[in-house]
Amino acid sequence: MSVTQERNLRLVRDEPSEPAVRLGDITLRNRLVTSSSLLGYGVANKPLFRWGMSPISTFVPLERFGAITTRTLTVQPRQGHFVLRDDWNLNELPALLRRYGRVLQQVDGGWLNAFGWCNVGIDAYLRDYYPRTRGQNTIISVGGFSTEEFVTLVDKLNAAVPAGEIAAVEFNVSCHNVNFDFNGIIESVLAEAVPRSNHPVILKLSPDYDYLAHARLAARHGVSALTAINTVKGLRLDPDTGQPLLSNGFGGLSGRAIKPVGLRVISELREAGVTLPIIATGGIRSFDDCREYFWAGADAVSLGSASWFASYPGYALSPLYAARIRRLLRRIEHYEPPRG
């Protein structure tokens, strides 16, 4: 780990019992965060059946994570390729599972999803969900199709959330499930929206875009940290019909299959001289996965589909999966990455 990385990542203690990790301007409770979408908005409307959140989360203390990242929020509510409802009854479960089958498929070594930024919108989130997650440290993920939309999102967060009350705002300018080329807006988004934010900004990088150029743009425009990586664009076809398994056609590949890609991207960012703090995501499930990412140059790690998703019958083992996450959380809470 370079001297610059050590300077960006320094352990500070406000109280002996509550260590905090500083990634530049970003304060985390520890080096383990959660990836966008897997835990919805950080809280569910039905405590017993947490629609919109991984069932595994029922058995994990979310307030102990370095931060919980929300699903990507847009200016207006957006159905995407899924559905906005989160108040399903048990007798409606078959219909809900059929909908999931059109936007989420388990594939070799991971998951392919195309939810398409399905979310309630920034206003509903701030009114109905955020007040109930004050005990968590939150990274609010936002997305838009223009610079103006990102500016609006930043202004709404500035007005509703005092500076220092959340860990950061994550700019999702790299999602493949919304069928939009973000290359044309990313520089103007960073130039205009980042300086307006009262909160530190994280830029989420895609391995399918020029992530080295985008990381340099982020550093130039005052971004506080990077998330690497977003999902990898993928496709699966029905072998009998030749039709895509997902309603969107293409989807985002996540899970164990993309871990080597994530490690490569982070290593290349460091080799290219990028010094911004990096939150790594991609196939992380064990403590050894975390250590690999730390060796590659990451400053924190994020649990995504490899930890929070299971086959539908497999969710019966949610307490066991949750126990594994809790053990990992305990190990990371006081872990110091290797020096030198």
Image (cartoon, grey):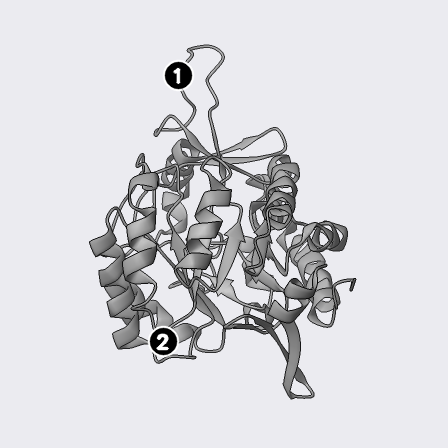
Residue at image point 31% right, 58% down:
191
Q: Quadrant of residue 9?
A: bottom right
Q: Quadrant of the N terminus?
A: bottom right
Q: Residues within 10 Å of mark 2 (few under 14, many from 20)?
A: few
Question: Picture coordinates of residue 126 (x, y %)?
Answer: 30, 69
Q: Residues within 10 Å of mark 1 (few under 14, many from 20)?
A: few
Residue at image point 54% right, 36% down:
111
Q: Amino acid at mark 2?
A: Pro
Residue 117 shown left or right of residue 30 in the figure: left
Answer above or below: position of 183 versus 236.
Answer: below
Q: Quadrant of the C terminus?
A: bottom right
Res 48 visible: yes
Q: Which residue is label 1 attached to?
A: 243
Residue at image point 34% right, 30% down:
248
Question: Picture coordinates of residue 308 (x, y %)?
Answer: 57, 50
Residue 278 is marked as none
Question: Picture coordinates of residue 88 (x, y %)?
Answer: 35, 51
Closer-to-camera residue (248/190): 190
SS assignment at label 1: loop
Find the distance from the CA under tag 2 to the CA under tag 1: 43 Å
Answer above or below: position of 290 versus 99.
Answer: below
Q: Quadrant of residue 66?
A: bottom right
SS assignment at label 2: helix
Closer-to-camera residue (257/220): 220
Residue 286 shown left or right of residue 40 in the figure: right
Q: Amino acid at mark 1?
A: Gln
Q: Which residue is label 2 attached to?
A: 131
